[in-house]
Image (tube, grey):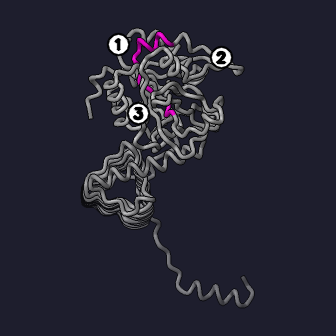
Amino acid sequence: MTNTAAFNVQALVLAAGRGSHMPGAFAKVLHLALGVPLLEHVLRAASGAGADNLLVAVSRQDADVESAFAGRGLEFVYQDPPLGPASALQAAQPLLARQASRTLLVLNGDLPLLRASTLGSLLETHRRSGAVATLLSARLAAPGAYDRVLRDPDGSVRGIAEVRDASPEQRAILEISAGVYAFEVDALLAALPGLLLPDARCESYPTNVIGLLAAAGHMVCALDAADAREAQGVDSPAELAQANRLLRERRVEELLATGVFIEDPASTWVGLDAQLEPAAVLRPFTVVEGRSVVRSRACVGPFSRLVDTDVGPGALILDHCLLREAVVEAGAQVGPFAHVRPESVIGRDARVGNFVELKKSRLGEGAKASHLSYLGDASIGPGVNIGAGTITCNYDGTHKHATRIEAGAFIGSDTTLVAPVTIGEGAYVGAGSTITEDVPPGALALGRARQVVRPDWAIKRRAAQRKGKL
């Protein structure tokens, strides 16, 4: 594809409004599709097409958009009240005039399926044609509520008809506007004064600039999208679900093409920022979110979820596990039914078994916690064995305290380690112990009550019960 950065591109993304059919207390563009906001998808597409100056049109009542994208180097344009793209363009005039020699992309902020490559093709068409405006269109079998592209008999674009005001003949047109435009800014600025055409609802028509430019004798072009689904906006929960499905399918197809093994594409979910190396394996109903990494020969699932977690080469995440902000090193095994919480590290060839929970803990190389344990704020050395039912009592009601278990130590089943406490290298802790003091290296610690045995007690009790004395 042509280097679109050479086009000297800027972009204005329309992100004001909450959506007429989108319930919720926040802006429509903050709803998530494949784990990131709708607006994020559009911004990435624009950046990928070479736009290095990104303007976002918002309403001042939608401070949540600014907050969500703070620190991203975006410039915000305020349109109050938000009366559609025309008012956004007028609000952006001072910023656009500052860089009037740059091509401007105008994009609806609810187009999560839009690809950077499609925007690159649009810019290429715009440059080669010499047009002052080029729009992205698509042909839909059922165009519904989308605005229609109007053409002259020779095929040239003469305008766009808003569907709410379109005639029956115009509604029958199958070619729709995707809400994606490339403009030459000088011509656009000259046309903006003619955009104020309020109707009875006090709204300005957002698409008339195309008709104004065409009527003034300027060349206006349209690029028919190769994939009409990229033109599908999101304005309802059903449309958001559809976008999620299509994005998930696209993502899975991309991963399969790189050599990732995905056993059941229909049930697998992988976020945009996750990294999977060739020969990684995802089993059915696996979810990989955030900035997770699954390295070569690692296997995850089925029914497991990773969030911002790094899984090393050859590691194995078994059924029904949840791992968040954790590291699993090469050859380690987790699960089934394990919960690994943030800031935990499972060392090389270590094992975390069924119904084990880790919180801010580190297991050294070859360490094992195979059954029914809670390990919080713990540093566990290489080769340590944690018996079933072991817990670290890390919280005193006010503060968290650390447990340290040094290399080669053996912790018997049903042990309670009351932090802060250290178990020395090679030490043994007997099963059923409550440990409140440090255990020296190589020592045996027992912290349980003395066993009492009363011979024949049970026999005598049952006999008394039969005689009705108990």
Residue 86, horizontal then vertical, whole percent: 55, 19
- Assess disc 3: are there few (<14), some (14-19) or many (≥20) residues with their C-alpha within 10 Å of its C-alpha: some
**Does the image show residue 177?**
yes
- Residue 445's quadrant in the figure? bottom left
Name the residue that disc number 3 marks: 223
Residue shown at 31% from the left, 52% from the top: 294
Q: How many marks?
A: 3
- Assess disc 2: are there few (<14), some (14-19) or many (≥20) residues with their C-alpha within 10 Å of its C-alpha: few
Residue shown at 36% from the left, 53% from the top: 253
Name the residue that disc number 1 marks: 101
Name the quadrant of the N terminus: top left
Name the residue that disc number 2 marks: 198
Q: Amino acid at mark 3?
A: Leu
In the rendered image, residue 170 lying in the magenta stretch gets the answer no
Please report contact status of discs 1 and 2: CB closer than 8 Å, yes or no: no
**Does the image show residue 434?**
no
Q: Earlier in the sequence, mark 1 or mark 3?
A: 1
Q: Nearer the viewer, residue 81 or 188?
A: 188
Q: Which residues are magenta?
A: 177-191
What element does badge 1 sit on?
loop
121 horizontally vs 139: left or right: left
- Residue 104's quadrant in the figure? top left
Q: Earlier in the sequence, mark 2 or mark 3?
A: 2
Residue 61, horizontal then vertical, whole percent: 60, 22
Q: Amino acid at mark 2?
A: Pro
